[in-house]
Image (cartoon, grey):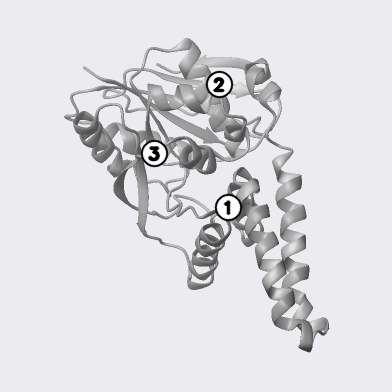
Amino acid sequence: MKKYTILIPIYNDRESLTKLIENINEELNGVNSEVSILVINDASSQQIVDTYQNLENIHSFEIINMKQNRGHARCIASGLKYIYEKKEFDYVIPMDGDGEDRPEEIKNFIELSEQVGEQSIIGERVKRSEGLFFQICYKFHKFLTLAFTGQSIKFGNFTCLSKSTIEKMLKEKATWSSFSGSLRKLEKDLVSSPSIRGTRYFGPSQMSFFNLLKHSLSIISVYRKTVLIRSALFIVFYILLIKSNASVITSLPLVFLLIMIYSISSLALRENIDEFNNCLTNINDIEKIK
């Protein structure tokens, strides 16, 4: 029997987490695998532990409370390190705790993993639930990433990672800053499973335009060498193109490009392998729910 651990980063969203756990338990009915849940509580300012009524299909359920808030990506990175060092498992399924990663798709991951063996699986977004403006911004994010890195990244955290993939990710400093960027960098042969972005159980989406921009630049920063080469080529050709019509307006693309380069250089400083290696010292305590 294969062992799966669902890894859920959470910050101040108890109602959503409670509903998600109930839905996961319901979706696991009839699944012939051992599935555990590990929640990483990113130093929430509110109590996130609730009375969980339905856990009969869940093998174990733990909540790790962190001392300091480190952010979504670093929560996942810390969870991967903890699971790899402390748990027996075959696969880890990171997913958001708000319902936007749909629990009904967990079965798809489990069934597909039985077929592909050591390959890791990504939930490739085929449909999103956000408004038109956000979807336009998201398409621009994908275009920007492809243009500057040469990588088409159509997935987020919702994946099914094999133990061999996690071992690679724990040695890669980019994992501390960008989950999807690091995964794409390390694994070229990923298996895709169609995934529909769900809606939040409670409250508005936490992915604002600013957060999406930061997310996009964090991915791009993983490939900064490629970005610098492509940017240099663009600057040379663009200057040759506009040299006879140079003006403040025609210079704006160069200004925006330089701002982007500065931004990804700053975000690249988040890739700290020493912090990553010592991230488990940020654990305050562990609550065993089941």
The amino acid marked with disc number 1 is Gln
Query: Which of labels 3 and 2 is toward the front?
Result: 3
Q: Which residue is mark 2?
A: 64
Give the CA distance from mark 2 to mark 1: 22 Å
Q: Secondary structure at mark 3?
A: strand
Looking at the image, is mark 1 or mark 3 nearer the viewer?
Answer: 3
Query: What count of labels does the image hold?
Result: 3
What is the secondary structure assignment of the residue under circle 1?
loop
Q: Answer with mark 3 or mark 2, whichever residue precedes in sequence.
A: 2
The first of marks 1 and 3 along the sequence is 3
Nearer the observer, 229 or 75: 229
Image quadrant where residue 95 sits: top left
Specify the label residue 159 is tagged with: 3
The residue depicted at 77 percent of the width and 54 percent of the height is 262
> Which residue is outermost to the bottom?
245
Q: Distance from label 1 to label 3 (Cα)? A: 20 Å
Q: Count neighbours of disc 3 (C-alpha within 10 A) and say few if under 14, some if 14 to 19, many if 20 or more.
A: many
- Closer to the camera, 111 or 55? 111
Q: Which residue is mark 1?
A: 206
Report x, y in % for residue 186. Answer: 47, 35
Q: Residue at x 25, y 27 (%)?
A: 117
Image x and y of residue 241, in percent: 69, 81
Q: Residue 53, relative to residue 11: is it above or below? A: above
Q: Earlier in the sequence, mark 2 or mark 1?
A: 2
Q: Is there a contact, CB below 8 Å, between mark 1 and mark 3?
A: no
- 61 to the left or right of 248: left
Tag 2, which secondary structure? Answer: strand
On the image, the x and y values in percent for residue 256 come to 74, 67
Quadrant in the picture for the C terminus:
top left
